[in-house]
Image (tube, rainbow, N blue to C red):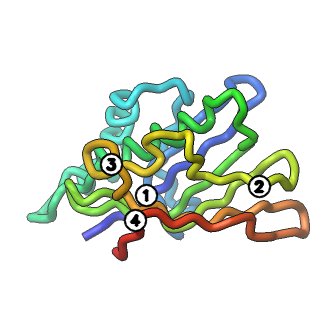
Amino acid sequence: GCRELMIGAHRDPVFGAVIAFGDGGKYVEAMPDVRVLLSSATREDVLDALMTLRIAPLLRGVRGESAMDVDAFADAVMAVAGMMNQADSRIESLDINPVMVGESGSGCQAVDAVVFTPNDSRVDLLAPNVDGAVAQPGGTGASMGFFVVLLALRPGETRTLGIKVTAHQDY
């Protein structure tokens, strides 16, 4: 099985870069179950925050279901935090939803993403200088399978900036 989670980030004028993550999918606004941390958070902070979500029992596995691969998801959250922390990052805000998280050891896959930038310049979410942006389950590598569609949204405007597929898996 898999679970739809989300990862977001925003450049706040007071706190700086913050990351948000939690339950995702089409009901993310209707039934919010999300945690927000500063982008300087550690991987352990992310894992601890995940276990405070209302859906935490589902992530651990209930009623005979397998646990979800929270380690791979935490790696993805940390990769987003790393992008937001880069001095040359032009990302103002981003929303990756859903992130399909598979059973423990099987990784996760970002299905769609929206990125807001200060202008219409191209932003590749999977920048080649961001190690860990595509991480294999439980470590590093290139098997996480990010499939990301980047959009620049302005009032009255939507356009595709780019698509990048790395080791795509179907869920």
Residue type at mark 4: give it.
Answer: Ala
Nearer the observer: mark 3 or 2; the answer is 2
Could you tell which of marks 3 and 2 lies nearer the N-terminus? 3
Residue underneath mark 3: 72
Mark 1: few/some/many CA within 10 Å (<14, 14-19, 20+)? many
- Check disc 2 and report its element: helix, strand or loop: loop
Nearer the observer: mark 1 or 3; the answer is 3
Residue underneath mark 4: 167
Count numbered badges in the picture: 4
Residue 161: in sight, yes or no?
yes
Q: Pointers 2 and 4 in contact (CB under 8 A)?
A: no
Q: Pointers 3 and 2 in contact (CB under 8 A)?
A: no
Q: CA distance from mark 1 to mark 3?
A: 12 Å
Residue underneath mark 2: 122
Residue underneath mark 1: 5
Residue type at mark 1: give it.
Answer: Leu
Compared across the picture, whether 20 is left or right of 140 comes to right
Q: Position of residue 119 (x, y in %)?
A: 87, 50
